[in-house]
Image (cartoon, rainbow, N blue to C red):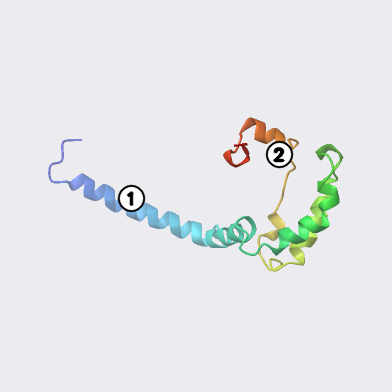
Amino acid sequence: MEFDPAGRFMQQIQQHYERASTALLTMMLSHFQLKGWLESCKNFFLLHQGDYLTNFLDCADSELDKEVSKASMSLLRGQLEMAVKTSSLAHDTHSDKLQFVLDPNSFTDLHSVCPLPIFLSP
């Protein structure tokens, strides 16, 4: 490859980049349904429609108060599924893929590893 003072190679590279970018975006939007996944993320994780979380926390309160090793994951999964099905997100096409894990560390354990300034005493 020679030095290209006229910018011919740069123009070709830019054209190929734009074509590849357009093809990738088209594939992500159509084949992988990117827009639907992003809407589900907005609904579930950014709490755009967060009534499912309130329902889940209300019905799972006693189970979530237990130590992680004593909590029933199957009961919690069932409560989460019921909370989603009775919420405004019941129609979400990706709601069946929602999962969770329980962290064995308590909040105070996590705080000692990575303290947040808002919890520090003056």
Residue sitting farthest toward the front:
122
Residue linked to disc 2 = 107
Q: Secondary structure at mark 1?
A: helix
Residue plotted at (44% across, 57% down): 25
Residue 6 rendering spot, x and y as whole percentages: 13, 46
Residue sitting farthest toward the left:
5
Residue linked to disc 1 = 17
Is 84 situated above or below 62?
below
**Of residues 94 and 53, which is closer to you in this image?**
53
Is 6 situated above or below 2?
below
Residue 111 rendering spot, x and y as whole percentages: 66, 35
Residue plotted at (67% across, 62% down): 50
Packing grade of label 1 (10 A; few <14, some 14-19, many >=20) is few
Indicate which disc, 1 or 2, sits on the residue closer to the N terminus: 1
- Residue 118 lies in what quarter of the image? top right
**Marks 1 and 2, how far apart in space?**
46 Å
Q: Quadrant of the C terminus?
A: top right
Packing grade of label 2 (10 A; few <14, some 14-19, many >=20) is few
Residue plotted at (61% across, 63% down): 48
**Of residues 7 and 56, which is closer to you in this image?**
56
Q: The disc labelled 1 sits on which kind of residue?
A: Tyr
Q: Is residue 67 left or right of residue 42?
A: right
Q: Is residue 5 left or right of residue 97?
A: left
Q: Quadrant of the N terminus?
A: top left
Q: Is residue 30 left or right of residue 70?
A: left
